[in-house]
Image (cartoon, grey):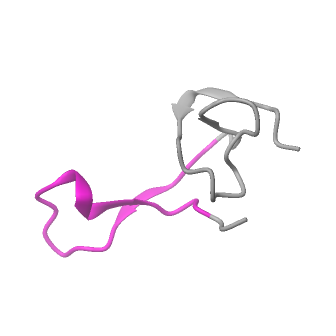
Amino acid sequence: MNDHCNRCVGCTVQECRHHSDCEDFCTLDRVQIGTHEGNVTMDQCTDCKSFDRR
């Protein structure tokens, strides 16, 4: 059970292994944010590189 909440990192992606089971927070102490685009112009261009499917 992922019950450790990092209240500095909100997250609603319940399919991620690092999503808290009790609240909408990430359980990691550090997350990596990146992009899949060569020229970032919108928030949709950014990705959580710490995502790990359950």
Q: Outermost residue, right direction?
A: 1
Residue 14 image position (x, y, % from top left): 62, 50
In the displayed structure, 36 sits above or below 50; it is: below
For image coordinates 79% across by 32% down, the residue present is 4
Q: Quadrant of the C terminus?
A: bottom right
Residue under the image location 53 percent in, 40 percent down: 11
Q: Name the quarter where the N terminus is drawn.
A: top right
x, y percent for residue 48: 47, 57
Compared with 49, 6 (above or below) is above
- In the picture shown, does residue 8 fall above or below 12? above
Judge from the rendering whether residue 17 lies leftward or rightward of residue 1; answer left or right: left
Residue 26: where, in percent of width, then height? 63, 40
* Rendered residue at 61%/44% (across/down): 30
Task: Count all numbered tags in the image, as a single digit.
Answer: 0
Q: Nearer the viewer, residue 27 or 20?
A: 20
Residue at screen point 76% across, 39% down: 21
* Residue most extreme to the top: 7
Using residue 38 as the reference point, say whether residue 10 is left or right of it.
right
Per the rendered image, the range of residues in magenta is: 30-51
**Residue 40 lies in what quarter of the image?**
bottom left
The answer to which quarter of the image holds residue 9 is top right
Residue 27 colored in magenta in the image: no
Q: Residue 18's spot in the image, x, y percent?
A: 70, 51
**11 sits left or right of 19 in the view:** left
